[in-house]
Image (tube, rainbow, N blue to C red):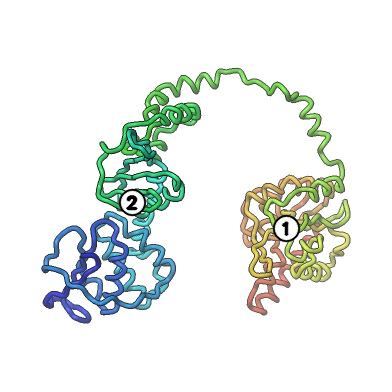
Amino acid sequence: MRGSLENPPPAEGRGHLGGGIHVVGLAPGADLAGFRAAARRLIAADVAPENIVWQTEAPSLFGADSAAADGPPLRLPRAVTELIPMVVPHRDPERYGLLYALLWRVVHGERALMEVASDPLVHRLHRMRKAIARDLHKMHAFLRFRRVPGEGRERFAAWFEPDHHILEAAAPFFVDRFRALTWSILTPEGSAHWDGTLRYGPPGRREDVPDGDGFEAGWRDYYESTFNPARLNLDAMRAEMPRKYWRNMPETAAIPALVRAASARAQAMIEKEPTMPAKRDPVRAVAKMSQDEPETLDALNAIIARSEPLVPGATQAVLGEGPVGARIAFVGEQPGDQEDRQGRPFVGPAGQLLSRALEEAGIDRREAYLTNAVKHFKFTLRGKRRIHEKPTAGEVSHYRWWLDRELDFVAPKLVVALGATAVLALTGKQIPITRARGPADFGRPFEGFITVHPSYLLRLPDEAAKAAAYQAFVEDLRRAQALAA
């Protein structure tokens, strides 16, 4: 009986309301609805996990189950509600007991339990969820439909042997992708059928699915034509596509022959003389690239201004500002909201703080060159506010060529890297600012200096700490001024 409870005579050991052992009978497979209903009743009755026996396929040791009134809904964290349906299909017979133990702890005060990855219960449930996700991925990737011959209406069937009870969880995926077809998925535990309505039925047999159809010959030819012998990795192939699935997939019949011939084909590819494209003259192509190389800072800025932002959303590219030949160049991370709107670097709150610090350090901002490693504003929209979002290493690398050419034209004596992103752009390495703060070797014709970004000072919550950090920042600028002089 799905989701039913029985309260036998009290057994020895501790118990809560009602005492004794509570037996819960659930349907075989993945009985998500039954588990939810039973868990609500048990939590409402304050029954501890150790006083419950969860049964699916075996008959009750205490006789017939008896129905009980449903309990109120449980208020659970989202992480818990998302975990439960991903663990219920697992074959582990302890899955319901583990999930109930999780619910018990959460409703009794451990609301953040799912965030404790080191907890043995949480760790085990996460491993079970990953196993279900892998099994679903295998079914989505390796299930093959074949046309059933001899029927008036075109119908397709597929055989699959999942590791866990995932049929009901996987079927909607195939409904979305093959909504216009009539099909059946047969497994050793049950079957799913679609003809405009999704229905579930009894187990099927592999013999009920055709061995092949006319489409498979074309699919096998395509698979053979895309096989790359130079990238053959048998261990990776077996890990991603275990042999248990091969007999149900038409393309796998070609794998043994492809593997046997891979070595000879790869050697033939190596020995084959490379050929140049018939319509492209490499000499002329190199000459054209040389002509496209910008010859002045203005020409480079024109290229930057015409370029689309790597991350959509920015209003415009924000170019560097200052004289060519400046003794000091300052490189920040990327434009902020105000910089993007005005088209000038360091004009927002962090820029205003930088201007104040430069003045206290004796540096004339008008005689320095200011720019950013990334030229477009990357942000996340929250309501009407555009919240700064840190650029990735790939995005920094994308803009690095522009920054290198820019500094070549400016030819400063000293470059000050403001923050970790600027250091990454100038060195190609992730270097902690606290460890490398001060003079630095960037491996360039100019001297280097590393300090914090002024936006870091704005984020400090404590006023005393903010004042001390600001004075240290001004002192860094004084040292950079001395090096440049």
* Residue 295 drawn at (x, y percent): 86, 41
Q: Nearer the viewer's eye, disc 1 or disc 2? A: 2
Establish if 447 lies above or below 337: above
**Residue 247 visible in the picture:** no
Contact, mark 1 vs mark 2 (Cβ under 8 Å): no
In the picture as drawn, the residue positioned furthest to the front comes out as: 152
Task: State whether residue 213 is above or below residue 383.
Answer: above
- Indicate left or right for 480 with 64 as reference: right
Of mark 1 and mark 2, the one earlier in the sequence is 2
Q: Nearer the viewer, residue 125 or 192?
A: 192
Note whether 111 is above or below 323 in the view shown: below
Q: Quadrant of the C terminus?
A: bottom right
Q: Residue 119: x, y in percent?
A: 36, 65
Q: Residue 134: percent from the left, percent from the top?
A: 38, 49
Residue toward you, 199 or 144: 199
- The kind of residue on which mark 1 rests is Ala
| Residue type at the position of mark 2 | Leu
Q: Who's the residue at 79% across and 45% down the image?
A: 405
Tag 2 residue = 167
Which residue is at 25% across, 61% downward? 94
Give the structural element (helix, strand or loop) at label 1. Answer: loop
Q: Could you say which is closer to the camera, residue 187 or residue 467?
A: 187
Tell me where residue 85 sits by quadrant. bottom left
Q: Can see residue 345?
A: yes
- Helix, strand or loop at label 2? It is helix
Residue 58, image x, y percentages = 16, 59
**Quadrant, the N terminus:** bottom left
Query: Which residue is denoted by mark 1 in the rendering?
Result: 314
